[in-house]
Amino acid sequence: MLISADDLKEIFRDQNLLIVDTRSFGEYSKGHIPGAVNLDLFAFHWFDTSQNGIASFNEQTRKLLSFTGIDENKKIVFYDNVSGMLAARGVWLCQYFSHPDVSMLDGGFTKWTDEKLDTETEPTKYSPSNLTTPIDTSIITGFEYIKENIGKITIIDARSKDEFEGTIPRAARGGHIPTAINIDWSKNIEEGLFKNDEKLASLYEIDKDTPIVTYCQGAYRAANSFLALKKIGFKNVRVYLGSWGEWGNNLELPVE
């Protein structure tokens, strides 16, 4: 799920490759990888994981990815400034739609420019496509699954310590989902790059057979933790799409 700047520079002009810059349009306009299209994923939050909410999310996300030019016949590479939450969200979304070849630029645009590789400021025009791949429901979850399985699954809260403890609530209530353990997503990266497998394994000392759910505020940092876990061999990992933006605002759900 990761591609290095050295490897990307060998193929970045390939016609069968689509590079997606997930930063804001302002950042994108100041300079981006040649040929990259802009998709500001931080503008696409989703806090309704009811059955109807997920159905709407599926429909809108497929349209969004298709408009961007993503389909199953292209190799897709997402990037942001580092190996961060936005590019991770893009990779996870494509995996959710069973895309066969999607990855993140390790180190992001910072690594690309540090290597003094080509950039441009002219926006790339979109070439919309039609993403027809099936949805992989095994890597997503809503609030109902978590509520029914508290105590049976490992829940990883990828937020900061202050958010986890409730001193920074960012919802109607502060705190965390009962039984959740706090592993801040920022510990996944070092100098803008994903840590190596040995360092990640020491961070996530969890039985690899246990079902895991990652969450944060809006499932961006959680997507980065999802990638970190998959990188070191965890198989049964889901991202809670609604995250604290949904859970913390639903007064009927339990909180610690």
Image (spheres, grey):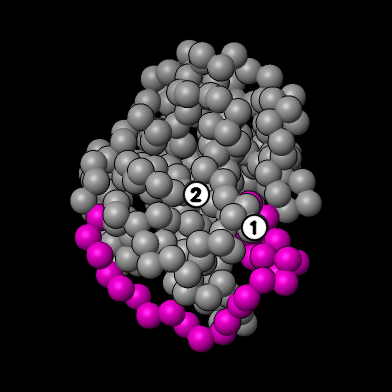
The front one of 253 and 141 is: 141
The front one of 37 and 178 is: 37
| Residue 32 appearing in the image | yes
Q: Which amino acid is tagged 1?
A: Asp
Q: Which mark is residue 62?
A: none
* Residue span colored magenta: 106-131
Residue located 49% across and 49% down the image:
103
Which of the 4 image quadrants contains residue 86?
Answer: bottom right
The front one of 99 and 214 is: 99
- Is 54 on the left or on the right of 34, as rendered? left
Residue 1, position in %: x, y? 52, 43
- Is 190 on the left or on the right of 32, as rendered? right
Q: Which amino acid is tagged 2?
A: Ser
Spatial CA distance of label 1 from label 2 is: 14 Å
Q: Secondary structure at mark 2?
A: strand
- Name the residue that disc number 1 marks: 6
Residue 175, position in %: x, y? 62, 36
Residue located 70% across and 49% down the image:
193
Which of the 4 image quadrants contains residue 140?
Answer: top left
Q: Which mark is residue 103?
A: 2
